[in-house]
Image (cartoon, grey):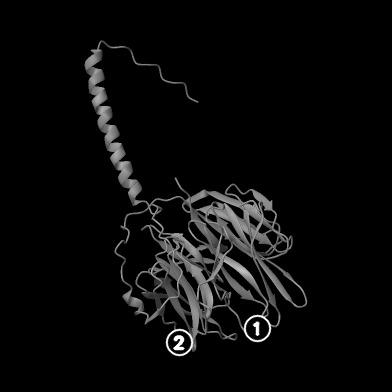
Amino acid sequence: MAPKPAPPPKKGFPILPVAIIGGLVLLCVCAGGVIAVTQLWDKMPWAAQPTDTVVLTEAPIVTTEAPPATAEPQPTDTPTSEAVQRSERWAFREHGGASPGLLMTQPGCSTCDVRAEVFRPVLYTIELGGDRLYYWDELLESVFYVTPDGGIHQIPSPPGTMADFAIAPDASAIAWGIFDSDDSGVTARVVLTNGEGEEVRVLTEERYTHDEGARNLIPFAWSPDLNTLYVAQRYWGIGGYILFDILPQPMTLDVATGAMQSLNATDCSLVALAPDGKTLAYLVEADDHQDLILRDLRSSNEQRIAGTPGHYQAGDLLFAPDSRYLAYAEALGNPESEAFSLRRVEVSSGAVETLITDERTDTFNVAGWVGNETGGFDIVVVGSKGSERISSSGRELISEYSFVGSWIEEP
C-alpha cells in the first residue's frame, strides 16, 4: 500500500465561515444523491410487484385465434432503450466425457466463470433455487447442489425412489416426488424438506394400481408466498413417439395441511405456473395440433390460443422471470424427419410470435430466459450447436454447452 500523502501546510483561513459554507455544500450533495438513487432504484427490473390472492374455481374458456406473427403488440410498460445494468448469472452443463462440469458465468465478465466438476457423465433433473444449482445424480442416486463459488454439497433425499423435485424460489424448501413400486402398482408421495434435505414431512400419499394406470406425483411449481405447491401426474408406460414431458391433471396442495384441490384441467398434456403466481398455462390436444390455454387465477377467465395445424406435439412451457411472456415449442411429430417451431406468447394479450419455424434438427429444447439490454428477457434454446439466445431481432450463439438457467443477484 502506498504511504499516505503528508497533510498540506496550514493556512490562516477564517475557520467559522469556511465551516458554514462547507456544510451547505455537503447538504446539497447529499440531497441530490438521495434523489438520484431513489429514481435509479425505481427503474430497476427486479422492483417487487404485489402478489394477488389466488382463487381456484372452474373456469369458462374463451376461444381466441392467434394474431399474425407480425402483429405482436407492444406492452404499455415497455422498458426504455437505455442499457439496463443488472448482476445476472448463467448456468450451463458441459457435454460428455468422464467428468462433465457445471459452469456458472456472468455476462460481460470473462474472469467470473466458476466450474464445478460433478464426476458423472449423466445429469437428469437440474433446477435453480436462490443462488444454488440443484441436480440429481442418477448413478449415485443422490441430490447435490452447487454454490456460486463452485462448492458441491450432497444432501439426503427422503426414503423411496426419487421421481422429481421442485426447489422453492429462495431455496428454503424442496418438494420431492417419491414413489415405491411393486407388482400391483405404485405408492406415490409428495414430501417436503428444507433446502438442505432435512426436516422431512410427507404432504400427501396416493396409491395407484397398474390396472387404473400407475403414476407418480410430480411437484412442478411453488406459489410466490410458498403456501401452495402445484403438482401434476406422470403416468408410467406411455408409448409412442414422445418429444416433450407429459404432466396431466394438475392440482394444488396446501403446504400447511396437505389438502388437495384439482385445477380442473384434466385433458391437458403439460402445465406451467407464472413466477408471479397469477397465470396458469396448459396445453390441450385439438385434432392435429395442441392449443395453449392461459388461465387468469385471479378472475378464473381463460383464453384459448390456437396451435399450428400439423404440429402434433408441443411442450417445454416456460414463463419469463417477469411473467410477461411464455415460450414453448411445437413439433411435427415425424420420427423420420422431425421439425420444431418456437412460439412466444404475450400473457396479457395472447399475441403470438413464431420466432423459429419448422427447423429440422435432432435436438431442440426451450431451456430458459436471459436478460437483455432493454430490461426484458430473451429465450434460450439448446440445439445441436449449443445454446442460442432467440429474440425478434434474430439468433445468437451464447455457448457450446447446454443452458440450465439464470438468476439475477440482488445488489
Question: Which residue corresponds to the image point at 68% horizontal and 53% vertical from the top-left?
Answer: 155
Q: State the image coordinates of residue 348 (x, y, percent, origin top left).
A: 36, 69
Query: Which residue is nearer to you in this view: 225 or 205?
Result: 205
Label 2: element kind: loop
The circle on residue 239 is 1
Q: Is residue 294 left or right of residue 386?
A: left
- Residue 402 to residue 32: above or below: below
Q: Quadrant of residue 352?
A: bottom left
The three-letter code of the residue at mark 2 reads Pro
The answer, for residue 92, to whether it is visible in the render is yes
The circle on residue 309 is 2
Give the Cα distance between marks 2 and 1. Answer: 23 Å
Q: State the image coordinates of residue 182 (x, y, percent, origin top left).
A: 77, 74
Q: Quadrant of residue 25?
A: top left
Residue found at the far right of this picture = 183
Question: Which residue corresponds to the image point at 58% horizontal and 76% vertical from the top-left?
Answer: 246
Q: Is residue 37 left or right of residue 365?
A: left
Label 1: element kind: loop
Give the mark, 2 or 1, whose residue is nearer the N terminus: 1
Query: Which residue is nearer to you in this view: 352 or 156?
Result: 156
The answer, for residue 395, to whether it is visible in the render is no
The three-letter code of the residue at mark 1 reads Gly
Q: State the image coordinates of residue 201 (x, y, percent, origin top left).
A: 65, 57
Query: Which residue is nearer to you in this view: 259 or 64?
Result: 259
